[in-house]
């Protein structure tokens, strides 16, 4: 019984010591620490940032604009040894004493920075959430599975043109008489397609002697959901075949132009993981 009582007393004393240690942190010490931390951010001292902000490891980009030391505001929270620090109007950090009595940052808002294109896409897909703390936001932004999901979802958008089967308008009569045909191409998107974005490739066929090198017809502008006709002539000796659309822009560029974001893509992705 005495051993159990002694153990309980030791636990209580340890808890009191830890609480006392945390309560000894004062605002001036936190202000001094916050100044050093801000300096590390501004100077790009990532190793020190990671050392005193362990949860930030993995993030290599931080941003602290319009920082003025005299305007930093430190507020003690209800939790012993925990402080809320306003570094700028857009950046805050939460500072506390760890078990060894060392001040460190354990969360923040507005401090993590991202590539501009990635951030714009994240805002359009719901991957980025305004007001979310940096740790949770970084976890969302670092989810590589979402990239794969989004590519699959936008796959139809990167091929906005649909080519139909060749239509014979007039058959070739004698050996040298021309026949006429056309190949329909439809813009399936809600956005105009410019002729500079694609071309129609085809091959000439000489009887049963095979094909020569590919030939091309320049693309033409196509309005949303409009169909245009690419016309060809042919004879009994020479025909055209193997029609195909060749895009002259990258898939990423086409996805950006033709895919219409709903803002619900990231939530849809999360639903697939449940």
Image (tube, helix red, strand yellow):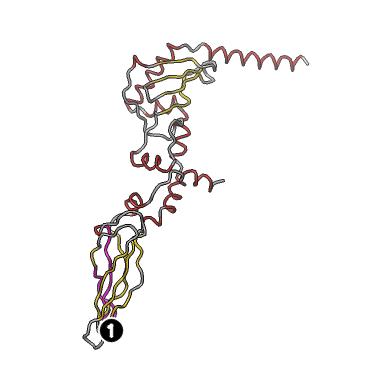
Residue positioned most to the left = 176
81 w.r.t. 143: above or below: above
The quarter of the picture where residue 51 lies is: top left
x and y, in percent, of residue 264 in the image: 46, 44
User: How packed is label 1: few (under 14 Cα within 10 Å), some, or many (20 or more)?
Assistant: few
At x 35%, y 16%, the residue is 71
Total numbered circles: 1
At x 50%, y 46%, the residue is 268
Residue positioned most to the right = 1
x and y, in percent, of residue 269 in the image: 49, 46
Secondary structure found at label 1: loop
Q: Between residue 10 and residue 83, name the one nearer to us.
A: 83
Residue 193 part of the magenta segment? no
x and y, in percent, of residue 222 in the image: 28, 60
Q: Between residue 27 and residue 185, name the one nearer to us.
A: 185
92 w.r.t. 207: above or below: above
Horizontal arrangement in the rendering, residue 102 relative to residue 253 (left or right): right
Residue positioned most to the bottom = 174
Horizontal arrangement in the rendering, residue 203 relative to residue 75 (left or right): left
x and y, in percent, of residue 40 in the image: 36, 24
What's drawn in magenta, residue-wise?
Answer: 197-216
Q: Between residue 73 and residue 236, name the one nearer to us.
A: 236
At x 29%, y 79%, the residue is 210
163 w.r.t. 158: above or below: below
13 w.r.t. 208: above or below: above
Q: Quadrant of the N terminus?
A: top right
| Residue at which label 1 appears | 207
Residue 203 part of the magenta segment? yes
Q: Between residue 132 and residue 82, name the one nearer to us.
A: 132
């Amino acid at each position: 019984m005495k051993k159990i009582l002694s153990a309980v007393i030791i636990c209580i004393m340890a808890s009191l010591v830890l609480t006392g240690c945390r309560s000894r942190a004062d605002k001036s010490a936190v202000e001094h620490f916050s100044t050093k931390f801000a300096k590390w951010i501004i100077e790009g001292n990532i190793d020190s940032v990671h050392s005193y902000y362990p949860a930030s490891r993995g993030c290599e980009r931080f941003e602290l604009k319009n920082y003025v030391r005299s305007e930093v505001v430190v507020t003690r929270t209800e939790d012993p040894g925990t402080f809320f620090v306003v570094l700028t109007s857009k950046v805050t950090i939460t500072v506390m004493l760890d078990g060894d009595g060392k001040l460190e940052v354990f969360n923040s808002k507005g401090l993590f920075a991202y590539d501009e294109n990635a951030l714009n896409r994240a805002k359009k897909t719901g991957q980025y959430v305004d007001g979310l703390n940096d740790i949770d936001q970084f976890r969302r932004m670092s989810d590589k599975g979402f990239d794969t999901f989004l590519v699959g979802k936008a796959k139809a958008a990167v091929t906005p043109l649909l080519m139909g089967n060749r239509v014979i308008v007039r058959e070739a009569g004698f050996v040298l008489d021309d026949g006429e045909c056309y190949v329909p191409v439809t813009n399936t998107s809600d956005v105009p397609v410019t002729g500079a974005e694609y071309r129609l490739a085809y091959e000439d066929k000489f009887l049963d002697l095979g094909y020569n090198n590919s030939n091309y017809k320049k693309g033409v502008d196509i309005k949303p959901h409009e169909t245009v006709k690419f016309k060809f002539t042919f004879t009994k000796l020479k025909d055209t075949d193997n029609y195909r659309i060749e895009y002259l822009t990258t898939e990423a560029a086409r996805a950006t132009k033709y895919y219409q974001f709903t803002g619900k893509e990231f939530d849809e992705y999360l639903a697939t993981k449940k």
